[in-house]
Image (cartoon, helix red, strand yellow):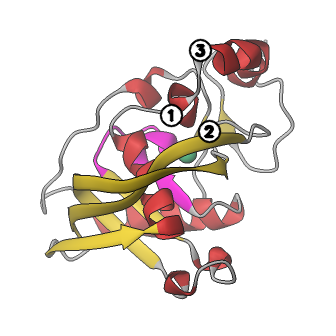
Amino acid sequence: MKLPIVAYGDPVLKKVAAEIGPDYPEINALIDDMFETMYHAQGVGLAAPQIGLSIRLFVIDASPFEEDDAQLKDFKKVFINAVITEENGEKWAFNEGCLSIPDIREDVSRSEKLTIKYQDENWTWHEESYHGLAARVIQHEYDHIEGKLLTDRLSPLRKAMLKNRLEAISKGLVKVDYKMKFPAQRKKR
Ligand code: NI
């Protein structure tokens, strides 16, 4: 089932998300729905706050980037209760987009490498290290469960320049090919 994606301006996107345990109801159906929603919107990652759930869960399928980076072949993963334990390497800029902020793409600077601890969909813990684009996609989704958006990583000047476009997005004044929930949209009578 495809779920509506929460747009910029919704408070759920600013909250630090909560850990969950194996008692979380119907987690497998939720994960399936998140992948379906992400693929339909042509994203490479989707975090639970983006569908209105403030829980530490995100899904990634970065295989569309395989041509740029061979480590992304079959890079399809579920991250539950993730904690980035280390970030290092040189900072580098990459042009990022976000399904919650349609039509906006911005260069974002992030560290080259990271180590992350997380549980998979079977609640097994892993600790893995990533670099380059794989690290990049993880960092973007991880920010979502920490209540941060790519706009929080821009310079104050750049963010000021985007202010009107961001306000328009929160009001639903944007053309988008997937279902969204806009926080400041006027109710239709
Ligand atoms: Ni995003």
In magenta, the rendered stretch is: 45-56
Which is more foreground, mark 2 or mark 3?
3
Mark 1 or mark 2: name the one nearer the start of the chain.
2
In what element is the residue under mark 3? helix
Rendered position, 117 above or below 103: below
Rendered position, 2 above or below 149: below
Query: In the image, what residue type sits under mark 3?
Result: Pro
State the image coordinates of residue 101 (x, y, percent, origin top left): 67, 36
- Identify the disc placed on residue 156: 3
- Identify the disc placed on residue 183: none
Tell whether label 2 touches label 1 (CB within 8 Å): yes
The reply to whether residue 25 is in sight is no
The residue drawn where x is 64% and y is 60% is 43
State the image coordinates of residue 79 (x, y, percent, origin top left): 31, 64
Spatial CA distance of label 1 from label 2 is: 9 Å
Q: Nearer the viewer, residue 1 or 84?
A: 84
- Identify the disc placed on residue 149: 1
State the image coordinates of residue 82 (x, y, percent, origin top left): 24, 56
Spatial CA distance of label 3 from label 1 is: 14 Å
Where is mark 2, residue-wise?
100
Rendered position, 85 above or below 133: above
**Quadrant in which residue 179 is drawn:** top right
